[in-house]
Image: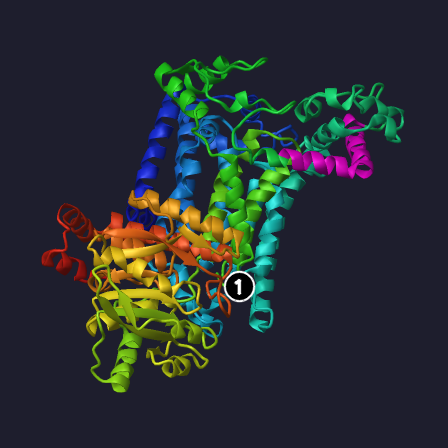
Amino acid sequence: MARRLVRLVAANRLFSIFLALGLIMRIITWLAYQPAMLYIDSFRYINNLYSLCVDGLNPVGYDLILVPLISIGRLFNSGLALTTAVQHLLGLAIAIVLYRISRGLGAPKIVSAIITLPVLLDAYQLHIEQNIMAEIWSDAILLGALWLLLAWKFRRAEGIPARHRLRPKHDRDHDHDDPDRRYGPLPWQAATAGALIAFNVPIRIIGLVVAIAFFGYLILAGARWRDRIWWKKMIKRVVAGAVAFAVLLGSYMIVFRIATGGWGLSAASSDVLYGRAATVAKCNELDLNANLTQLCPNVPLDQRDGVDAYTHSGSKVEPLPEGTTQEQLRHEFGMTVLRHQPFDLIFAVLKDFAKGFAWSRTTSHNDVPLKRWQFEHDYTRWEATDANAVTQRFDNTDPHVIGAFTTFLRAYQLHGGYTRGTFLAFAVLLGLAGAIRRRGGLRAESLVTVGFGLLLVGGAAGFEFSWRYQLPGLVFFPLAAAIGFSALTARKRPAMAAYPDATDQAALQRFSEQYGEVRFPELVVVIAAYNEEKGIGPVLDRMPKTCPTPDGRSLDVATVVVVDGASDRTAEVVAEHDAYVCVATDNRGQGGALRLGYHLAADRGARYIVTTDADGQYEIDELPELLEPILTDRADFVTGSRRLGSEEADSQIRWVGVRVFATLASILTRTKITDTSFGFRAMRAEVAQGTLLTEPQYQASELLLGVMARGARVVEVPLTMRLRNSGKSKKGGSITYGANYARVMIGTWLRDWVGNRATRRLRNAARSAHSGSTAAEEELSTPQPR
């Protein structure tokens, strides 16, 4: 497994760079504050290190981890320093596992690398890893459990994303070599994951809430509600997960029972409920007895302290009634408030939950101060604690800092070196979108991942808001976004093979049998059509037979309609309107049909190729304006622009999308682009033939960026876009279309602009000498290797 992970990291240069940066930041942090940073809770953990009492405010799980680490480190006078070093390595390991899960579920390399940035470079994450605190271990254990749960979904062959292997529903049994794996996690995976989740509870009690997502996933994974075999396997894994979870957690609760006489996980449970209830309790409206009245804060609601203050101090009942404890009365007070003011408590929790998604990090009224989780120039010390005694005991040194490093870390953190909460909110939405995306095949995986994050962050908000409690979101929300992105961009069809594939060859053979060795005129209009029998006729009726040129001549126009596996009379309607028809029996998508049309036109004599849609959205009367830049030798590729011209928009989302993707394309190509998806375009035949095209559906941006990558001169002209004259769009929902369009655009840029030296050479040569020479045209027409 270690070798496999190393190969996985080495295969992605971008992720390797991010990982190296994360390592450098952790070395700086570790050296800056030696031997470790100590928070208030750190002293509780250390004081309980060798007694391992389970009835303290903090559970004992983290101490079980600290004992071997500190014991080994003390042999070298580095007990705390070794612990923080291991915690920093654990942070790097979390990033690698995030990358592995993301790639295993089919996310692109660039997306899988980007989602690791919050864990690798967030200053608050670095801060908590340098502290003697349990958070990093809890995140790692829960992520390990999630890894085990999702591993059955990973691709079986490296380098083949899962979305490329999607099969028809009736054939999905072949997605895995092992037939048992197609039904969901195996019982041993469920049992091990359940044990890890249970083991995490004594480390951070809030981790108990992820059991909801855990058991939900065991039920939903690989769901085949009519398959009896699936039901048997689902029940087996649920039982295995439940037994392992119950045995491990039950054992800890038995130990707690023996030590304290009561069932529980720590002594803090009643205080937590009381602290939250005390901040919202309307004392005058509650039916409280004399004892509970003493626990209700005697100050107006808007002047009360925060949850933390009441949890760790607050009022006490005096004299204490015989046979009761302060904890019992606090619990009774909290339950009373919960019964009578449930909506007040829910609103307070939701308000705190929403704070974590703010753009910047600030401290709201009565919240735990943000300053606690920020790097300081000097070593941070807390009242009633003796950091020197602790560090001398375990590391034989006083706490000390390296000023240059602490100054750098503080400046980095205060000037944007953290993950914006708004980005995490977007990640949550992307994960939820993947959970409702049926075709992606990752609904349950998206749901369980986003569920882990929401339950941890939301569950902590049930107690109080603290930026420390938002840290699990850095792990699970970006991963949920990657899985959601994979689900949204799951291809209905795999990438096309190099031209000509079997479908192309069969279509060309049929065309030759029908039309013989016909030669086209200089100008050919190519239309891709799929089930457009009602809309294609009016489009062909308006198609001109000639096109005027700037020098007063006219070009003859031929129209070729590539019918893309249609199941209606589209081909017959085209023939009736005196246009050439080329029939591809397989429905590959608009990209496959247009690619076939480009080569067919160019091979049979066309010099200029124009594309338009079969739905009548574009004004064919604007053909002379579209061709003018090519005919006057100002361009090799011309595309219309609805933003420069006019548009009849039927979707506000797509209206925004046109502008967003134009901005993205402008940034990627460093060229001003206003419209990347306008279907009315013209190009030289050699440009169309020489561009690598593999996208079956979302091909507009692949064509545009691919042409520009090879150094072709691109010009936009103002044209008109109308509403469809009939039928409905085949592009799918706006969110799905947008996600796939982004995938294709970024993928084409990485392929043709970043990772392809041949296109870089062509682009540079074309920039220096592209005056229409024969040599330049030959280079542009040279097909790229796949």
Between residues 10 and 235, which one lies in front from this camera angle? 10
- Determine the image quadrant of residue 257: top right
Q: Residue at x 36, y 82 (%)?
A: 575
Its colouring scheme is rainbow
Q: Nearer the viewer, residue 672 or 20?
A: 672
> Is there any visible trace of residue 226 in the rendered image?
yes
Q: Is residue 321 visible?
A: no
Q: Is 122 colored magenta in this rendering? A: no
Q: Residue at image x 32%, y 68%?
A: 594
Q: Residue 738: x percent and y percent?
A: 45, 54
Q: Is residue 30 left or right of residue 458?
A: left
Magenta highlight on residue 337: yes
Picture quadrant where residue 588 is located: bottom left
The prevailing secondary structure element of the residues shown in magenta is helix
111 with respect to 221 (left or right): left
Q: Is residue 608 left or right of residue 235?
A: left
Type of the residue with mark 1: Gly
Q: Callout 1: few (<14), some (14-19), or many (20+) C-alpha neighbours within 10 Å?
A: many
What residue do we see at 34% from left, 44% from top? 666
Q: What segment is highlighted magenta in the picture?
A: 325-352
Vertical placement of 527 versus 762: above or below?
below
785 sits to left or right of 244: left
Depicted 619 relative to depicted 67: above or below: below
Which structural element holds mark 1?
loop
Where residue 117 appears, as percent x and y from the top left, is: 41, 38
> According to the image, label 1 marks what residue?
222
Residue 283 at x, y = what percent?
84, 26
